[in-house]
Amino acid sequence: MAIVPKSLRTRRGVLRSAVAGAAGLALGALGRPELASATTGAMQFGTTNNAGADHTSLTSTSSSTTLGLNNPGVGKALHAIASSEAAIAVYGVCNPGYGVLGDTGSGMPGIAGVWGRDSSLPPNFPGVGTAGSSVAGTGVTGYSSSDATVTPPIGAGPVGVFGYAPSGVGVVARSDTAIALKVLGKAVFSRSGRVLVPKGRAYVDVDLRPWGGLGGAPLCFANILTRRAGVHVETVRPNYPVTGKLRIYLNKVPSSTTSTSVAWIVMN
């Protein structure tokens, strides 16, 4: 057997390795698609893609999530921008179901499931942070409960904004230096109404138990709607004669052969 010098063996090994590596790269290139811009093929990550006027669509029959985005840092998981006035940055459609559902998730309490903000400043035309529109249903529904899986009730009839909390506050209006709540039009309160004081009597009872009772220190008001000379509401006594009722006292029995109409309201 011929003896091959060590230096020659080394050169041959390097040559064989180079040839094998080149062949492997060529075969790998045959089975791997080229990176392309978004206008011609695959979307590239870590850079800006331009689809031009083309429409990009993603369809999935999965029962889970079609597209998942996760940003564990302090940035935005999804940032959508629409530059024209008539354009829409995010448009969600689901029939039936939720067009857009925002969830702060479990664990530490989040800020808000859905947050709308208007950042325009003068002289720009002021916009709206969150707007809701409905043809015949509810424009915006707010629901607060420890059981987030319960479907919130919907306000009866066409409703612009509906806030509901089984044990908390349904809607809070706050302003530190201006008007917290301004109503343009009629205001209706379920804990108000009219009641008749029967003839020959100087008091009448109103049952508030179907409307939450009279817990705490309620503010109760009443006023006579029927003219009775020398007669007025003397006092309104909450939680009497039983808890959850209020008694409206007149200063005396009206000298009339008919009942006396009284308007009442409970503020808290």
Image: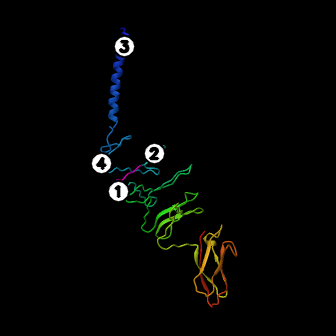
Which residue carries the number 2 mark? 75
Left or right side of 177 for 81: left
Q: Which mark is residue 52?
A: 4
First in sequence, mark 4 or 3: give its number.
3
First in sequence, mark 1 or 3: give its number.
3
Instruction: Name the residue type under label 2.
Output: Gly
User: Between marks 2 and 1, how big is the CA–CA gap?
Assistant: 24 Å
Instruction: Name the residue type under label 3.
Output: Arg
User: Between marks 1 and 3, how big is the CA–CA gap?
Assistant: 70 Å
Region in magenta:
79-88
Instruction: Name the residue type under label 1.
Output: Ala
- The one nearer the camera, 229 or 79, is 229
In contact (CB < 8 Å): disc 2 and disc 4: no
Residue 4, image x, y percentages: 36, 10
Q: Circle 2 — which element?
A: loop
Residue at figure coordinates x 42%, y 67% from the top left? 135
In contact (CB < 8 Å): disc 3 and disc 2: no
Instruction: Name the residue type under label 4.
Output: Gly
Which residue carries the number 1 mark? 87
Residue at figure coordinates x 36%, y 17% from the top left? 13
In contact (CB < 8 Å): disc 2 and disc 1: no
Q: Circle 4 — which element?
A: loop
